[in-house]
Amino acid sequence: MRSYLRADGGDCELVDVDGDQVHVKLSGACIGCQPASVTISGMRQKLNEATGLALRVLPVS
């Protein structure tokens, strides 16, 4: 996912993992981007598929 974000001028950073919550910080072109919620949803889907866990991805400022 990160390579796709960077290609569009954005980026993401893993901030924290607390139980089933994964906190990420979006930056660059992702700040204020209308489809940022779609990006977060895609991250959640990829993480859930990769880990087999039901994780929640939450954006932080």
Image: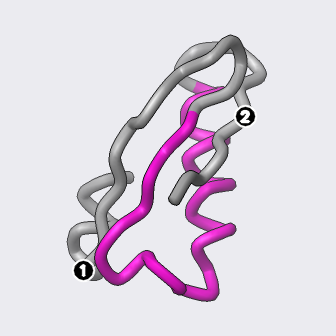
Picture residue at 51% right of the left edge, 59% below the top: 61
Name the residue type under label 1.
Gly
Residue 57 placement (x, y as % from top left): 65, 41
Residue 12 placement (x, y as % from top left): 35, 54
Quadrant hosting residue 45: top right
Q: Is residue 18 above or below residue 3?
A: above
Residue 44 placement (x, y as % from top left): 64, 41
Residue 33 placement (x, y as % from top left): 53, 85
In the rendered image, which residue does mark 1 sit on?
A: 9
Q: Is residue 45 above or below residue 38?
A: above
Decide if residue 9 is on the left or right side of residue 34: left
The image's colouring method is: one colour
Q: Which residues are magenta?
A: 23-49
Q: In the depicted view, which residue is nearer to us: 14 or 61?
A: 61
| Mark carried by residue 30 | none
Picture residue at 56% right of the left edge, 31% below the top: 47
Name the residue type under label 2.
Arg
Give the spatial CA distance, label 2 vs label 1. 24 Å
Q: Callout 2: helix, strand or loop?
A: strand
In the rendered image, which residue does mark 2 sit on?
A: 56
